[in-house]
Image: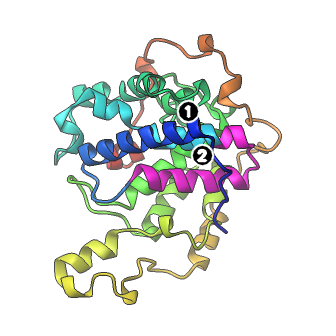
Amino acid sequence: MASMQPQLTAAERALRDVLTRLAAATDEFEGYKHPHAERVVKLADELARLFGLGRAERASLRLAALGHDLGEAAMKRDYIARQGPLTEEERFDLMRHPVIGEQEAARAGADRGAQLLVRWHHEWWNGTGYPDALSREQIPLGARILRVADAYAALTDVRPFRAALTEVEAHKHLTEWAGIEFDPQVVRAFLTLRDLPELRSYALLERAYSIEPERVGAPETSTTDEPDDGAAALIGSVPESGVNPHVVGMQSADSITQTDAPTELSVESSTETESSTDSIAR
């Protein structure tokens, strides 16, 4: 069931509209062919509903999902949408974008909770993410949710430097990196999602464009290449985290003070490999 979003105030609508425009420009800059940020918003909000996050936390998460890559657009680096692998220098430079995104979200008027979720959306469960090398429950649940939603939406869309993964391929990626990059319980929850348009991969749709353009949009171009029980089977292979997110890790980003966010990038934080989400999806 899709999540029901509460009625927004005039100020909340104005802020959302500003971030929506900025997000659309960011999507275009990053080379997405389809709306990426809005897709991340819906996936993240549905996960937040499943985890029982409150209205304020969900509102902050939706804003962060819209603005999660504002830093990339602000950096204006042509390598972000360039074909071919990044150099070591470019990869390290790109690691600055969550901090710059935090600043851009603040400039747009997002609350402090949303700003910190933007800052921490590339933190890894095992502590090797960036910019602050947070691990496990040090990472607010909203940021752990955003990491999974962003990764799935990026992997299943076409980028200038790679084709889209199918739904099954993306599910497999989340499963393989659960306990390393992703919170295992968030991955488990994600694999239970059904009947959301945002779950559909653009992989087969793009193949249809390249082979038979007149068939694009027809019902038979469904992108699910395995039945729903394929995702259910993967759930059993997701490692147990040993932690119940309903008991710990529910810390709201709003409850974290300004001083809790380091001002310098952790140089040791990235142990990215060729198959990590950051390597595949940027």
Disc 2 residue type (three-letter): Ile
Does residue 237 appear in the picture of this structure?
yes
Which residue was labeled with disc 1? 117
Q: Is residue 203 above or below residue 273?
A: below
Q: Point out the stretch of residues depicted in magenta.
A: 36-58
Q: CA distance from mark 1 to mark 2?
A: 10 Å
Side (left or right) of 155 relative to 255? left
Which residue was labeled with disc 2? 145
Disc 1 residue type (three-letter): Leu
Q: Residue furthest right?
A: 247
In front: 143, or 172?
143
Looking at the rendering, in which quadrant would you find the N terminus? bottom right
Do tag 1 and tag 2 residues touch (Cβ < 8 Å)? no
Residue 163 in the image: state x and y as whole percent: 27, 62
Task: Check disc 2 and report its element: helix, strand or loop.
Answer: helix
The residue located at (53%, 27%) in the rendering is 115
Looking at the rendering, in which quadrant would you find the C terminus? top left
Side (left or right) of 213 relative to 68? left
In front: 107, or 238?
107
Side (left or right) of 61 relative to 32? right
Q: Residues within 10 Å of mark 1 (few under 14, many from 20)?
A: many
The residue located at (25%, 76%) in the rendering is 207
Asked if residue 43 is among those painted magenta in the image, a careful observer would answer: yes
Rendering quarter of residue 71:
top left
The residue located at (77%, 42%) in the rendering is 243
Q: Is residue 141 above or below residue 223?
A: above
Display coloring: rainbow
Q: Residue furthest front?
A: 10
Q: Is residue 99 above or below residue 271?
A: above
Task: Check disc 1 and report its element: helix, strand or loop.
Answer: helix
Q: Is residue 24 above or below residue 237?
A: above
